[in-house]
Every structure is written in C-alpha cells, then in structure tokens.
Amino acid sequence: MTRYEASFEIDSKSDSYAARRILERTYDTIREESRSFRGDSDAASALLEEFETLRDAVKKPSPGRLVITYEQYDEDFDE
C-alpha cells in the first residue's frame, strides 16, 4: 500500500476560509456522486454523513490543521 499525505496549517482567517472551501467542495462532490450510486445506499449515506461532519466543523473560522491522507491499495478493482 502506498500512502500520500498533505497537511495544511490553519493559522489565519484566510487559511480557515480555504480549508472550509476544500471541505465544502469535497462534500458537494460526494453528495452529487452518491445520487448516482447504485450499490449499498447505506454506505453512501454513511460516507456523506462523515463529510458533512467535517464540512460543518470548519464553518466557524478557527486555527487548526487539515490533514488529507490517500492510501492506495495494491489490488485492482473488481470489474
């Protein structure tokens, strides 16, 4: 498994705004994709709920850190 990580230090209102925009955009994208999701709708709802929590957490500007981790597995998709 390969792991990639990006960390964003939030130490100003403009940084906080940028983090909020990242999470809002991610939430909107997942929401749109989940509408066309034809598999387990409970899994799609749970994923959307998790990102909704993240999106709501950054609504009030405050210092912090946003860490994005992508883990790439060695196997392929089942087709």
Image (spheres, rainbow, N blue to C red):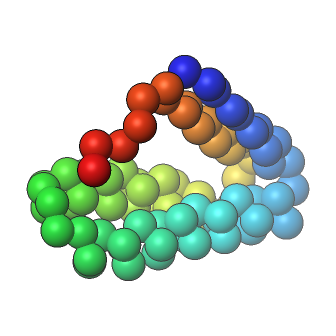
Is residue 13 in sight in this rendering? no
Q: Residue 26 in the image: x percent, y percent? A: 53, 65
Residue at x-position 48% and y-position 53%? 54
Residue at x-position 38% and y-position 78%? 32
Residue at x-position 85% and y-position 48%? 11
11 or 27, nearer to the observer? 27
Q: Quadrant of the N terminus?
A: top right
Image check: 16 left or right of 68?
right
> Quick check: 17 above or below 47?
below
Instruction: Give the number of callouts.
Output: 0
Q: Residue 41 in the image: x percent, y percent? A: 14, 61
32 or 57, nearer to the observer? 32
Instruction: Report which quarter residue 35 is drawn in.
Output: bottom left
Image check: 31 left or right of 17?
left
Residue extending farthest to the top is 1
Is residue 8 in sight in this rendering? yes
Instruction: Report which quarter residue 70 is drawn in.
Output: top right
> Quick check: 18 above or below 3?
below
Q: Residue 49 in the image: x percent, y percent? A: 30, 57
Residue extending farthest to the front is 79
Q: Residue 30 in the image: x percent, y percent? A: 41, 67
Image check: 38 left or right of 14?
left
Residue at x-position 22% and y-position 60%? 45
